[in-house]
């Protein structure tokens, strides 16, 4: 499933990036996957995935 339609980034891609790079914030995550750089609508969903991964890695 795509979380970020603007950049065609899937939830799986976000999850893998969070696991691999352990970003502390969306800003850090953006160094690895370009989420939220256009319309910004995906930020909320991306944050939820990050929270989930940090709680249940
Ligand atoms: Fe992610 Fe638009 S859906 S920037």
Image (cartoon, helix red, strand yellow):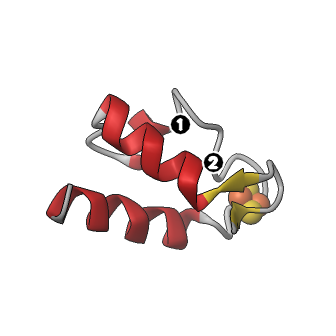
Instruction: Evaluate if marks 2 and 1 touch, with contact meaning CB atoms under 8 Å apart.
Output: yes
Residue assigned mark 1: 30
| Quarter-of-image position of residue 16 | top left
Residue assigned mark 2: 35
Crowding at mark 1 (Cα within 10 Å: few <14, some 14-19, many 20+): some
* Nearest to N terminus: mark 2 or mark 1: 1
Secondary structure, mark 1, is loop
Mark 2 vs ligand 1: CB under 8 Å?
Answer: yes
Q: Can you say whether 28 is above or below 36 in the image?
A: above
Left or right of 54: which side holds 26?
Answer: right
Left or right of 43: which side holds 24?
Answer: left
Q: Residue at x 80, y 52 (%)?
A: 8
Q: Residue furthest left?
A: 55
User: Which percent across, then down, holds residue 38?
Assistant: 78, 52
User: Which percent across, then down, holds residue 6?
Assistant: 83, 55
Q: Residue at x 70, y 46 (%)?
A: 37
Q: Residue at x 40, y 34 (%)?
A: 28
Point out the quarter of the image occupied by ligand 1: bottom right
Total labels: the figure holds: 2
């Amino acid at each position: 499933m795509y979380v970020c339609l603007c950049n065609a980034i899937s939830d799986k891609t976000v999850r893998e990036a969070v696991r691999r790079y352990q970003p502390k914030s969306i800003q850090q995550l953006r160094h690895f996957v370009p989420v939220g750089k256009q319309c910004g609508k995906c930020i909320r969903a991306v944050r939820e995935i990050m929270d989930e991964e940090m709680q249940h890695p």
